Amino acid sequence: MPNSYVEFTGNGSTTTYAIPFGFISASHVTATVNGVATAITISSSNAVFASAPASSSKIRISRNSSQNTRLVDYTQPSTLTEEDLDTDSLQAFYIAQEAVDTEADTIRKDLTDLQWDADEKRIKDVANPTADQDAVTKHYLENTWSSTSHQTN
């Protein structure tokens, strides 16, 4: 189970979806519907869409922690507070979780045979092959197979 995102399928009537992961700021929570960034408002631990995503639409609500800007800047002389330490630690923890989730969603090698494993997912948007050892798409194979003459010996 991912630590930094949740996925739903729209039903055409639901506008509020539970956010099961922690976040530091509402600005760190984003949503896509069918891969398109979609505005949401955060209410407590819920993401609220202005209008319900269409039936069968694919919804992903993600935490995207600030990776380029530190949320806490320790200065001298300053008071070291529990809140600053918690925020600093949570930022690093959430970024680590997001990296682990990203890695889990990628094609990786199966360690038993060191071959690429798509984990039973379709691979899409593959270009037509140009070299002898390139992967072949279903479309390319069907068009090539149907357009060539086949002889049996």
Image (spheres, helix red, strand yellow):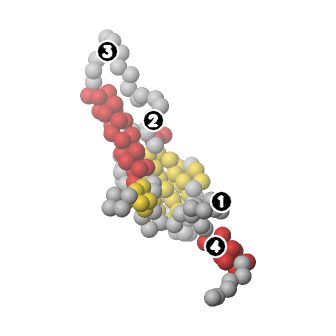
Q: Mark 3 and mark 2 in contact (Cβ < 8 Å)?
A: no
Q: CA distance from mark 3 to mark 4?
A: 67 Å
The picture quadrant where one finds residue 54 is bottom right
Q: CA distance from mark 3 to mark 1?
A: 62 Å
Sequence order check, earlier mark of 3 and 4: 3
Sequence order check, earlier mark of 4 and 2: 2
Callout in the foreground (1, 2): 1
Sequence order check, earlier mark of 2 and 3: 2
Q: Amino acid at mark 4?
A: Leu
Name the residue carrying label 3.
78
Any mark on residue 118, and which?
Answer: none
Name the residue carrying label 4.
141
Q: Amino acid at mark 1?
A: Thr
Callout in the foreground (3, 4): 4
Q: Mark 2 and mark 1 in contact (Cβ < 8 Å)?
A: no
Callout in the foreground (4, 1): 1
Residue 106 in the image, given as x and y percentages of width and height: 45, 54
Q: CA distance from mark 4 to mark 1?
A: 13 Å
Any mark on residue 130, and which?
Answer: 1
Q: Amino acid at mark 2?
A: Ser
Q: Residues within 10 Å of mark 4 (few under 14, many from 20)?
A: few
- Left or right? Give the position of 122 relative to 151: left
Q: Residues within 10 Å of mark 2 (few under 14, many from 20)?
A: some
Q: Mark 1 and mark 3 in contact (Cβ < 8 Å)?
A: no
Dot 1: element: loop
Sequence order check, earlier mark of 4 and 1: 1
Dot 4: element: helix
Q: CA distance from mark 1 to mark 2?
A: 41 Å
Name the residue carrying label 2.
66
